[in-house]
Image (cartoon, rainbow, N blue to C red):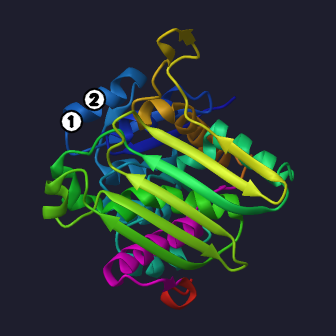
Amino acid sequence: MSRIDVALIGAGRMGSIHGPNAGRHPGLRLKYVIDPRPQAAAAVGAPFGATHVALDQALADPSIGGVLVCSSTDLHLEHILAAVAAGKAVFSEKPLDLDLDKVVAAGPQLRDARLVLAFNRRFDPHFAALKAQVDAGAVGRLESLHLINHDPAAPPSGFIPTSGGLFKDFTIHDLDLARWLLEEEIAEVYAAASCLVDPEIGRLGDVDTARTVLKTVSGRLCVISNTRRSGYGYDQRIEAFGSKGMITAGNVALDTVHAQTEAGAAGAPIQPGFMQRYAEAYRAEVSHFADVLHGRAKPLVGYADGLVALALAEACDESVRTGQVIQFGEFFHA
């Protein structure tokens, strides 16, 4: 397989995942890392022979076929637009931006772009297997969903002011997951939220625990459970209820050993965090980006999905603020 050169923007938490995944992929070559911190860029790029350069230099290089945008959230859209304008395919972390109006305005540039948005749950093999069975009619017509997304522990307080809030940073994954599984647009949004985990999060103007109810245009329902602290690991589950039964995707444990003694049952804990739980999904989405670059596939999740997910997150915020059910079709017009 020939290799296409790519550049990575951002050598932080997500860049340190996606950059090496690109560097190890047989169809990609990580050529550049762009980050204001040279040491961080070298830590990610040096094992793959990638050099630390300025963004303009990377985008001006005709050998660069794709750009992975893993910069801070407030720079995602700026970097996506610059890469698209330079004729590059783009793989970007979510969300597209924290400002819905800016994302709407970018529609003419991004609507038909080769853009893969990193909603990694779609690429998780366990969730993909559940969707395949639902699509095959294993439980009849899908009627309702229960999505559980609980972090093991709250993030550092310094993360909160720039995160965009619980719904744009965290719940947005579940909002996209619901649309993907239901294959139907959302008509109503209701969210209730509190600060129950860390008072500092509340002091900074955010919430850390929420329940969201989505209702589709045909009346199907989805309940989303979120918290910044589970106390028992990274809880990631789906329960799908259909006209002929139910189907679930459970948590992934550290191992499959299970003991039964007089003291009761004992087994390994579930995965401790997102990097371990979704390692396969992160590899799969970069592999999909490679397929897009090589012309073997079209983006499975892109601008339109990111736009609606961000709008749904804003509707959740509005519902919490007002205490009202949000009529999504009136709240947002794509």
- Name the quadrant of the N terminus: top right
Q: Disc number at residue 38?
A: 1
* In this view, 190 is above or below 22: below
From which residue to which does the magenta span run? 298-327
Along the line of sight, the residue nearer the viewer: 246 or 310 = 246
1 and 2 marks in contact (CB < 8 Å): yes
The location of residue 11, given as percent across then percent down, is 31, 39
Residue 288 falls in image quadrant: top right
Along the line of sight, the residue nearer the viewer: 62 or 24 = 24
Q: Residue under circle 2?
A: 42
**Kind of residue at badge 2:** Ala
Along the line of sight, the residue nearer the viewer: 116 or 279 = 279
The location of residue 165, given as percent across then percent down, is 30, 63
SS at mark 2? helix
- Name the quadrant of the C terminus: bottom right
**Kind of residue at badge 1:** Pro
Which residue is at a point 39% across and 65% down the rendered structure image?
A: 77
* In this view, 23 is above or below 266: below
The location of residue 198, given as percent across then percent down, is 19, 51
